[in-house]
Amino acid sequence: MLRLLTERRIRGVPVVDERRKVVGIVTESDLLFKEEYHDPAGTAVPPDDAGHRGERAKAASATARGLMSTPAIAVTADVPVARAARLITEYRIGQLPVTDPNGRLVGIVARSDLLRVFLRPDKEIHDEVVHEALAYSLWRSPGEVEVRVHDGVVGLYGRVQARSLIPIAVRLVRSVEGVVDVVEELDYERDDVSPTLSPD
């Protein structure tokens, strides 16, 4: 398993059951327990210390199930890149298994993959937001909304036709590769969200 991590230049591999559902993940740290808790002869040190029993049990294991950390933090394929990046930062992990809606493994995204996305120039992000995300969500000239991009943070300013269009626009902008966050300061001409009170 260590050879696999080294050859693929990754920091962990997901563990799946017979249905390809993710049940855990084996990381570099898990493999290091085998080194820390083995004597030079390669024999596992008995788990006589309750405070380190979990680590010693991992060291004695010869299978991925025994070595893996659970539960595995995973994402589905439709999760925005920014959300995946936040999870990697929050849990201090190097990679995330990617699953289908049924929890079956379809891939893995690494911290390095996300960094490449976030290194996208602001100009490229701006152009895609204006000509694709906003043009699709607002159904009219996106020039009526001012777009500012700084270090991947997109600001939306101006006025749209209907209030219901605002969350749609924000969601599509968040899905653009390289977008770290969205600051929304939009007004609307028509409130099609709040219920209309009928006159008595």
Image (tube, rainbow, N blue to C red):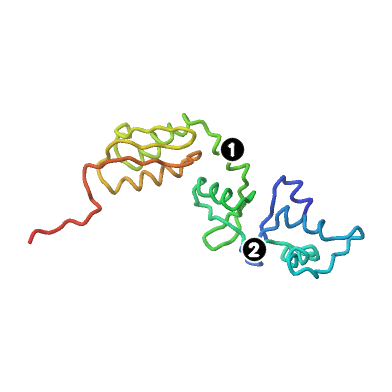
Q: Residue furthest left?
A: 200
Residue 72 to residue 157: above or below: below
Q: Which residue is mark 1?
A: 116
Of labels 1 and 2, the one closer to you: 2
Q: Amino acid at mark 1?
A: Arg
Tag 1 near tag 2, CB within 8 Å: no
Between marks 1 and 2, how big is the CA–CA gap?
28 Å
Residue at disc 2, secondary structure: loop
Where residue 135 sits in the image (x, y, percent)?
A: 35, 37
Residue ID at (22%, 48%): 191
Q: Position of residue 124 (x, y in %)?
A: 48, 31
Tell me which residue sits at (69%, 55%) in the image: 13
Residue at the disc numbered 2: 70
Q: Which mark is residue 52?
A: none
Q: Which residue is pictured at 55% across the width and 39% down the height?
A: 117
How many discs mark residues in the rendered view?
A: 2
**Position above or below: 144 against 71:** above
Q: Quadrant of the N terminus?
A: bottom right
- Category of crowding for the residue at label 1, using alpha-carbon neighbours closer than 10 angstroms: few (below 14), some (14–19), many (at least 20): few
Q: Residue at x 73, y 57 (%)?
A: 30
Left or right of 56, for residue 122: left
In which image quadrant can residue 186 be found?
Answer: top left
Q: Secondary structure at mark 1?
A: helix
Question: Residue 18, position in %: x, y?
Answer: 66, 67
Q: Earlier in the sequence, mark 1 or mark 2?
A: 2
Apparent side of residue 171 relative to residue 29 in the rendered image (left or right): left
**Three-letter amino acid code at disc 2?**
Thr
User: As drawn, which residue projects farthest toward the right?
Assistant: 41
Q: Residues within 10 Å of mark 2 (few under 14, many from 20)?
A: few
Percent of width and height locating residue 169: 36, 43
Say which quarter of the image contains residue 183.
top left
